Image (tube, rainbow, N blue to C red):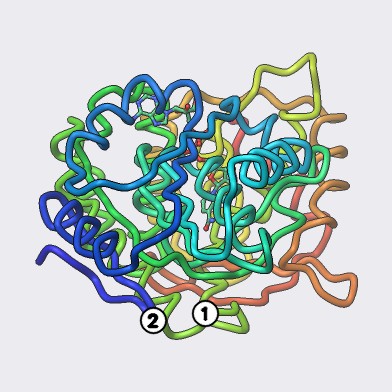
Amino acid sequence: MDSIISDSYAVHFNEEAFKALNTHLANKKYSIVFILVDENTHELCLPNFMAEINGEYQFEIIEIESGEINKNIETCVGVWEALSELGADRKSVLINLGGGVLTDMGGFIASTFKRGIDFINVPTTLLSMVDASVGGKTGIDLGALKNQVGVINQPAMVLVVPDFLDTLENRQIISGFAEMLKHGLIKDKTYWEALKEAQSLEHMKSHILTSIQIKNEVVLKDPTEQNIRKILNYGHTLGHAIESYFLENASKEMLLHGEAIAVGMILEGYLSHKLLGLSEQSLEDIKSTFLNKYDKVEFIDTDIENILKLMKYDKKNSHGKVNFVLLKNIGEPVVDVEIPIELFTDAFAYYKV
Ligand code: NAD
């Protein structure tokens, strides 16, 4: 299979991706084709991308600085101004060539510029291929608070070309792999078992399609996250708070998104064991699988207090309550679980030993 159909758009793979893009560009007759890159994707991905385009179009390249720290309104203003100065109109298109930071922010910039222009996601990290570029969530951070401002809006198409991963550093690959492991945990025990065996990049690449199918299936059932889509947040309620805390704390080494949610998935595994009867064996399986792949993160008591404070800003909260997605079994999630406060400290204690 070379394409997955989502609600209003398709995700195209490999050779199919560039064929679909060339047809789309020829049909749409965009006034200007803007390509948003960061300094890394400019150098490492743009030349290969451009080499695949047939036909004569007016291209304009806009470069932003890479990094979660730049996923903010100041960067958006810079890009909106560049679009304006370069003559973008409502018939222009923005192609987002980069990782999740760039596709989240580029999607938001396009969705709000002149009340919305088309955008196309071309994810170049594993995380953005299997997760960020599919599902229509776009947005930026507000200070250290992750993804506080944004809209749900679908791209015109998503192009997944796994060979872009060949230049990505290993730490980033492993970070993206955490989202794939999550897909196994929330949807399919057999997939979880298969992923545990995946050691090489080639092996991981071979599972990308399955992960996108799982995410797409969930998003199609519940695009605006009223219910089932919440299962994709497994590990993220604590994981996002941990990520935000490490991002805003200059004395801490920054954690990548997948590294933070890997910790979140162990902690939320513990809560699942205590509250929903996830078996001890499954809990140990989750902990050992993640600790095999991800370095253990040190937390002191004040870290934990601050992380729990940050958790109250999570977007999934409502009516002042923090809601969790937990697991009854591997592959069987339950949404909207409330947690007795004392269990959080126990969960961190379990992570630490
Ligand atoms: P990222 O976008 O910061 O990319 C990581 C680094 O890799 C950057 O320095 C980038 O320049 C570089 N890079 C990108 N492609 C490369 C390539 N092919 N070769 C070499 N270097 C390359 O990080 P990420 O992990 O892709 O994305 C994280 C973001 O995704 C977070 O902001 C998170 O909130 C967001 N996210 C969004 C969703 C969603 O549904 N919208 C889901 C999950 C995560």
Name the quadrant of the C terminus: top right
In the image, what residue occupies the spot 41% across and 56% down? 120
Q: Position of residue 129 (x, y in %)?
A: 35, 49
In the image, what residue occupies the spot 45% across and 75% down? 219
Q: Are marks 2 and 1 in contact (CB under 8 Å)?
A: yes
Which one is in front, 100 or 108? 108
Secondary structure beneath label 1: loop
Indicate whether 220 appears above or below 76.
below
Q: Earlier in the sequence, mark 2 or mark 1?
A: 2
In the image, what residue occupies the spot 86% across and 38% down? 306
Residue 346 shows up from this direction:
no
CA neighbours of label 1 inside 10 A, class few (<14), some (14 to 19), many (20+): many
Residue 223 has which mark? 1
Residue 203 shows up from this direction:
yes
Q: Amino acid at mark 2?
A: Asp
- Quadrant in which residue 256 is drawn: top right
Total number of numbered labels?
2
Indicate whether 287 appears above or below 280.
above
Q: Position of residue 164 (x, y in %)?
A: 26, 34
Secondary structure beneath label 2: loop
Indicate whether 81 appears above or below 248.
below
Q: Position of residue 277 (x, y in %)?
A: 52, 70
Residue matched to label 2: 7
Which one is in front, 58 or 347? 58
Q: Nearer the viewer, mark 2 or mark 1?
A: 2
Residue 117 has which mark? none
CA neighbours of label 2 inside 10 A, class few (<14), some (14 to 19), many (20+): few
The CA span between labels 2 and 1 is 9 Å
- In the image, taking residue 152 as reference, residue 231 lies left or right, namely left
